[in-house]
Image (cartoon, helix red, strand yellow):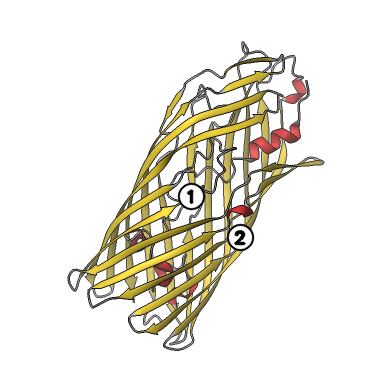
Amino acid sequence: MTFSRNRLAVGVAFGVLVAASQASASAFYLQEQSVRGAGRAYSGEVADHGASSLWWNPAAIAGLEAHEVYGGLHAIQVDSDVNNNGSTITRPVPVTTAIGGDSRVSKPIKSGVVPNFASAWRINEHLTLGLSLAAPYNFTTEYGPRSWTRYDALKSRLTTADLQGTVAWRVNDKLDLGVGVSAVHADAELTNALPNISPLQADGLQSLKGDGWTYGWTVGAQYRPTPALTLGASYRAKVEQTLKGEVAVSGLLAPIPASSNFKTAGEAQITTPWMAIIGARWAVNDRVTLNGSVSRIGWSQFDAIRVKYATSSSTSVQDYKDITTAAVGVDYQASPRLTLRAGVQYDPTPTPDIGRTARVPDGNRMMYAAGATWAAKPNLKLDAALSYIGFEDTKINRTDVTATSSIVNLRGDVTGSAVVMSTGARFSF
């Protein structure tokens, strides 16, 4: 029997940025960055105007007639079940047995609140500066200590903050350009159980805590061929993240050497995806505006997790694939002060069918949304939205060799849905 600390580092690091699975968008991306956008399933944000669209397009603030401040909160309530379907463990003895423990886990993905903030400052008729704060990858999943998923996942907590500075320029009445630079911070905690050699022995535990800063950038443009039609396009670059922290192992018993229980420094290197978005808003008449967008998300950048551990390194292949999402929506001016909106979005999963884990029990999803804006004052608009996300039933199917040389075959079924309640305000001055 061999015990590989290098393999352990890979296993611990795996969940660092995949804790937000099944929140609201594919894999571990949270798209709740605009309350107004939530009401139409984010179908028009790349072509809309104002500070609340900064995440989607840095050109969105060009040509503002006044300074603007936006703030939003999104309460995410997830209802999911993860059920065992014949998972086994083969210990080094070798003996193959059922993993055992609780065969059903209800609501492993915890509910939470996603905040966002943006501001835009008009310098002159051509130049506008912006500052925004988003939490694009931010959630917690948790399984009990007796869960059948315990050798793959117990607790996964991820918090990210993307602070973006933006410069937008109105070239002329038809064309706006924008560029943004972000400072991105990630903080994560991950735990999972380790099987001892005998099934009669209690499980050990491994954990990782880490954080780190990195930088990213985005560019965008908006073009108005006619007063009624706005076309938008943006590109957000991939972000290469290094999380430095501490790896700890405890509870491993003889015949595993006592030295296998330890605490040491380590780091994991991962890459979050690029995003290319195109979209349009068309004012059919004074009351109705149609919205549409298509996004290509470069999840194949998340091809592997690369770990540096003491004097060694290792790679854990993830094999994610690029995806294309699509959304359509409508805004309806019900009265001079009330705007109603609705939208639908299709969002396929980038996770592979073979290799999908309990940490990312992700499936294709559909979003159905409705929202409204109330102009409380000429310079104050209040936004609200309600979204329902239906997850396609999917399967967990992954085989791993643990750091204690046991082979774990995870087989399970996943069902779920989510409701997102969003509220926010936009103030100009």
Identify the residue at horizontal 20%, vertical 71% (top origin).
Answer: 337
Q: Nearer the viewer, residue 237 or 51?
A: 237
Residue 229 x %, y %:
36, 79
Q: Earlier in the sequence, mark 2 or mark 1?
A: 1
Identify the residue at horizontal 52%, vertical 22% (top origin).
Answer: 86
- From the viewer's perspective, is 225 left or right of 268? left
Residue 4 x %, y %:
76, 30
In whole angstroms, how far apart are the C-alphas of marks 2 and 1?
16 Å
Badge 2 crowding class, 10 Å Cα cut-off, few under 14, some 14 to 19, many 20 or more, is many
Residue 308 x %, y %:
75, 44
Q: Nearer the viewer, residue 406 or 74?
A: 406
Which amino acid is tagged 2?
Lys
**Residue 26: which numbered mark, if any?**
1
- From the viewer's perspective, is 138 left or right of 344? right
Q: Is residue 98 above or below residue 16?
A: above
Residue 96 visible at all: yes
- From the viewer's perspective, is 110 left or right of 87? left
- Given this view, does label 2 or label 1 mark the residue nearer the observer? 1
Residue 78 visible at all: no
Which amino acid is tagged 1?
Ser
Instruction: Tell me where residue 80 sits by quadrant.
Output: top left
Badge 1 crowding class, 10 Å Cα cut-off, few under 14, some 14 to 19, many 20 or more, is many
Identify the residue at horizontal 41%, vertical 42% (top origin).
Answer: 392
**Residue 107: which numbered mark, if any?**
none
Q: Is residue 200 above or below residue 392?
A: above
Instruction: Tell me where residue 403 sits by quadrant.
Output: top right
- Label 2 belongs to which residue? 238
